[in-house]
Amino acid sequence: MAMLKGVRNVFNISPRFAAVYFKNVVRGLSSEPPLTSEQYPDLKRGPYSEVTNDDLAKFSSILDPHRVVQDPEEIAPRNMDWMKSLRGTSNVLLKPKTTQEISEILAYCNSRKIAVVPQSGNTGLVGGSMPVFDEVILSLGLMDNIISIDDISGILVCQAGCILEKLDQFLSERGFMMPLDLGAKGSCMIGGNIATNAGGLRLLRYGSLHGTVLGLEAVLPNGQIIDTLSTCRKDNTGYHLKHMFIGSEGTLGVITAASIMVPYLPRSINVALLGCQSFEDLQRIFKAAKSMLGEVLSAFEMMDYDSVKASEFIGLQNPIGENNFYALIETSGSDAAHDEEKLTALMEWLMNEDLVQDGTIATDKQKMTNIWAVRENIAAGLLEIGYVYKYDVSIPVPRLYEIVEDLRNKIGDKVITIVGYGHIGDGNLHLNIVTEEHDPKVHQLLEPYIFEWVRDCEGSISAEHGIGFKKTKYLHYSKSMECINIMKDLKKMFDPNGILNPYKVLPNK
Amino acid sequence: MAMLKGVRNVFNISPRFAAVYFKNVVRGLSSEPPLTSEQYPDLKRGPYSEVTNDDLAKFSSILDPHRVVQDPEEIAPRNMDWMKSLRGTSNVLLKPKTTQEISEILAYCNSRKIAVVPQSGNTGLVGGSMPVFDEVILSLGLMDNIISIDDISGILVCQAGCILEKLDQFLSERGFMMPLDLGAKGSCMIGGNIATNAGGLRLLRYGSLHGTVLGLEAVLPNGQIIDTLSTCRKDNTGYHLKHMFIGSEGTLGVITAASIMVPYLPRSINVALLGCQSFEDLQRIFKAAKSMLGEVLSAFEMMDYDSVKASEFIGLQNPIGENNFYALIETSGSDAAHDEEKLTALMEWLMNEDLVQDGTIATDKQKMTNIWAVRENIAAGLLEIGYVYKYDVSIPVPRLYEIVEDLRNKIGDKVITIVGYGHIGDGNLHLNIVTEEHDPKVHQLLEPYIFEWVRDCEGSISAEHGIGFKKTKYLHYSKSMECINIMKDLKKMFDPNGILNPYKVLPNK
């Protein structure tokens, strides 16, 4: 296996990577991917109507005409995912501003059997917000109003198109923060986060969106508006419908607004980056951190050697020496002295146990940001190196890294690198395999091999990215036929014409 | 309004209460309530088959014959709720031990259109686990196996019939605890807790069951077993079906097992009981506690004067002086010195601000238990005083106590007392009105008045108790017609014959 050993930064890389780097970055990896319909020739377009001039006139009567976009240049990036791996052929982009407009659009599209794909930040990794064929793109981007903030109880109500980072900034000025954080925060939108049940970096501490989302407003495919936008922390009145929409990836309804329980901004944050020799040591560090940091532990991320090298590849600096594994530990608390004392006690214990080779603790904001940047830019770094096969799996922690080593033994000689990083605190591994170019033979070696591996240890084939378009045929590795059948019945009940986000989540056969 | 002032304990009570006490406790409130069908004469029995000898033979072939109970004495307490307010006429009690047995029973009952009511601890307050007419009672009580505990990740897997307190004991021996705790813990079962989405005393810190339940096994009315018993902390593969069963009160399926994320047992626990003059002061104490205790705050309960008197009524001792309002504050943390320092700082601040009239801090277990007992026995104390009208509502915190005062002004002269207590940290008020005997005139003054009040301030008419049987006709105060219609469609999809827990959750019209 070609480890990234020696690839210190973009100015000091091995000849092989220099060649890849030159090809992809300097020359520009600007070429478009093949059309999705060409990549998946067996997939047939559903029996949906094509958009006519009458339809466009109707859309223009619901929205202002300038929010009914047909300009191919404006639509092009909406037809393509962030990874440039899929490309749809939509030629209509609708930009509603209100729930009522979305209701009218969907009711009309449903009556005309026009397929619609809701799209917010378009940062998904499984093609969930991509038009597969010529679906109308319903952008949530103009639905970006903050509706209210209750600064006694800490409850935010906002529209679906609010960008995660902007919400976090808005809240921080009021002493609160969002309960979730992810690398894509600068462009992902809260509606998309909820639709995919995004996990991210703060889940360890603040839990999943099923716990923090108090209420939702959503529009069903028939245009009906479902208002469960409660700001009550507790509400046991009938079936808990909001959960139907959380994680259903825009296939049952379009989320238009949410009420979210937001935690207090911690008074004290510390970030430590530690290097260690083995995954076994990393697990021991994790267990000690959980026990000794207790309620102030807010993140525990792991990266392997090659992951950190990938971030260095795009110019980011690893602040400690080279190590086989890295643990990024964050504490958030209400008392700086107490938190530091806990962290110091942990560090002393780890040193005494000889578990840590190298490390640094950051308390000032810039240094913390720099450490987090190394973790958050692994994905971007890998994309610069070559074609990336991305897997996002849940595996019981003791076996979390075994799959990386197993794959290195199996196909290490056929790829540039295989890296493992992620949220060890949640048993969530991001497994990435990089080749120079898309290689169907490697693809065949990876799938369904990885999914079988994950199923056999009772993991999940998609921990947080969702099923989207790319993984529908592998759903059965994590869901029984009984569950898939209930999902199909639910889809039929909510969307009898199947107009909303077709070809997603459910297997096509 | 007849405040409970002066009712120190059972040996020192006012003449009026002495009379009530004598009638109810000494003479014994042993009489059965009228049959539910007599109390609700407009409600008609559904078109279900009556159980025949052939049916009994079939049940005996699925279970052992001795687990098909027809003995009226054994069935009698299962026909009646904890509050002795409802009484069904079931004459068959089934006691399965396995999921497979439940599957076969439900499949058979579905084919024969025999109505079934699942019942676990029978501690609910809205009649959700009561037979209304002659439904077969399906007891979960023998399904009480602990299946596994992962003591690295803290994940418990157990059957639905495990008693909450026993689970907590089992976990405490392994360094963990249940993420929920309630007054009924000694008899309530985890399956029932999940079916009603029970909240309780630890919700403030550990969140709702939608966040802590990782997976469920459930049996659908047609006998199909749905296995989503994942132990992954993160799993975004398709619709999140488990949430359909959490809080649906046994109307969509019977929960048979659960996997639950359990927190570490805290190393340090402190409990403080504080007395203050007004609800405004109580809110300021709450805000200060959230801010100064931060991540170690694990409970914040409020009680008014009469609530504490009710506990005293059954012999419990209030460890501090008499106050208009009481705050029960609990901290749980990993470092005793840090937690005590935070709590001491809070106390000093509260004293300086003159917010607290009286108070005590407990660090030893017995004293903590005694303080919690005062809070946990309010409901039992009220039941000894007379007939209790119970309401469990979510209201924005600033207006939480207004409804108590409003009701006192409105009907205070017609009742023994009106008390307010509950989980102020969650905006959840337990509002209880006590009369000597059930009084239809008082009932009419309370309903729908309270529900309208709650709706008008955008609260929830049932914060944690659920809708069950008693509140179905008031569901629309917290749910739109669109939501109720979707609920009906879901019920139809999961239970086309309507055999599972009929007359519950959904309005009968």
Image (cartoon, coloured by chain):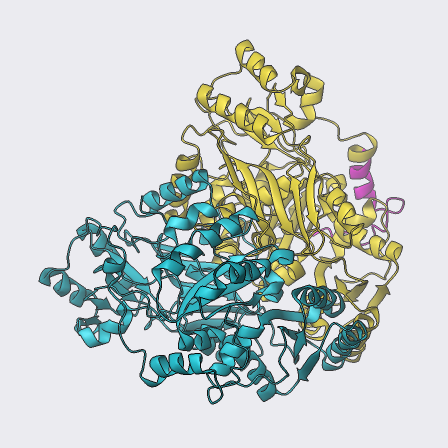
Chain colours: A cyan, B yellow
Decide which of B151, B246 is in the foreground and name it. Answer: B151
For the point 39% across and 78% down, which residue is it?
Answer: A20
The C terminus of chain A: image quadrant: top left
Q: Nearer the viewer, residue A482 or B198?
A: A482
Range of magenta residues? B1-22
Which residue sits at x=19%, y=48%? A47
The quadrant holding residue B188 is: top right
**On screen, A189 above or below A220?**
below
Q: Nearer the viewer, residue A214 or B503?
A: A214
Q: Is residue B447 visible?
A: yes
Q: Is residue B14 magenta?
A: yes
Q: Is residue A180 above or below residue B411?
A: below
Inspect the magenta stretch and tell me whether residue A260 lies in it: no
Residue A28 lies, with reference to residue B296, above or below; the image says below
Percent x, y for residue A5? 55, 78
Q: Residue A476: x percent and y percent?
A: 43, 45
Q: Residue at point 28% right, 70% down? A: A78
Vertical comparison of B506 with B106: above or below: below
Quick check: can you spot residue B404? no
| Residue A292 picture location, percent across and down | 76, 68
Q: Main secondary structure of the magenta part?
A: loop
Task: Tell whether B3 sits left or right of A121.
Answer: right
**Front-most of residues B294 and A248:** A248
Q: Position of residue B390 (x, y in %)?
A: 63, 45
Number of disc labels: 0
| Residue A147 appears left or right of A456 | left
State the image quarter where residue A481 is shown: top left
